[in-house]
């Protein structure tokens, strides 16, 4: 006697499939319209995260799993994203501090640039 698994209505899969096409069209429209700067990248990232979320939730059946399993799978990548964001902020702070104290041209400190050529 074979064990029966969970059965989900096919309509859910077709709706999500259509929604993924719509989100992809919006993502391409961002480039077609010509958005630039932070608006462009934030829209592309939002659409990318939405598509990834729908794929994980529906096609990987995460929507029907227990919360403990969801946290065990989704939690570590989220923590890594937070840590990467903190490193990016700290990196910007370091660059801005160096520019503030040393100025734009820092090549003179490593034996290159105008100071090395004067000798």
Image: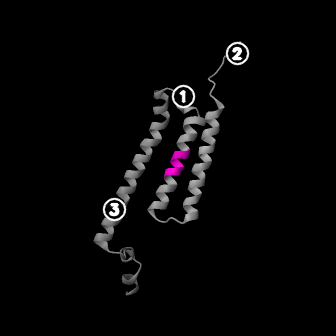
Where, by quadrant of the figure, is residue 60 drawn?
top right
Measured in 3D between alpha carbons, the distance from the residue under mark 3 to the one under mark 1, in whole angstroms, is 44 Å
Q: Residue at x 59, y 58 (%)?
A: 28
Quadrant hosting residue 89: bottom left
Mark found first going from the N terminus, 3 or 1:
1
- How many angstroms separate mark 1 from mark 2 (CA)? 21 Å
Where is residue 61? Give x, y as percent.
58, 32
How far across and down, in percent of the image, does residue 24 sit?
Answer: 59, 52
Q: Is residue 60 left or right of residue 72?
A: right
Magenta segment boundaries in residue numbering = 46-51
Q: How many marks?
A: 3
Of marks 1 and 2, which one's residue comes earlier in the chain? 2
Q: Nearer the viewer, residue 26 or 109?
A: 26
Per the image, the residue denoted by label 3 is 94
Q: Circle 2 sits in a helix, a strand or a loop, which is it?
A: loop
Is 99 inside the magenta-drawn segment?
no
**Residues at badges 3 and 1 in contact (C-beta under 8 Å)?**
no
Identity of the residue drawn at 46% across and 56% down = 42
Q: Callout 2: few (<14), some (14-19), or many (20+) C-alpha neighbours within 10 Å? A: few
Kindly state the secondary structure of the residue where label 3 is placed: helix
Residue identifier under label 2: 2
Can you say which quadrant of the picture contains the C terminus? bottom left
Residue on which disc 1 sits = 64
Question: Magenta: predominant secondary structure element?
Answer: helix
Is 108 in front, or is 51?
51
107 or 99: nearer the viewer: 99
Element type at marker 1?
helix
Q: Position of residue 14 (x, y in %)?
A: 65, 38
Sequence-wise first label, 3 or 2: 2
Above or below 50: residue 103: below
């Amino acid at each position: 006697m074979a064990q029966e698994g969970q059965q989900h209505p096919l309509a859910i899969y077709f709706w999500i499939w259509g929604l993924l096409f719509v989100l992809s069209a919006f993502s391409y429209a961002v480039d077609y319209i010509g958005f630039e700067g932070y608006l462009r990248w934030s829209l592309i990232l939002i659409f990318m995260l939405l598509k990834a979320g729908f794929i994980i939730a529906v096609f990987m059946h995460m929507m029907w799993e227990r919360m403990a399993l969801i946290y065990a799978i989704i939690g570590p990548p989220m923590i890594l994203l937070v840590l990467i964001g903190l490193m990016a902020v700290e990196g910007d702070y370091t660059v801005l501090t160096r520019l503030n104290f040393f100025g734009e041209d820092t090549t003179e400190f490593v034996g290159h640039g105008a100071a090395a050529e004067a000798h």
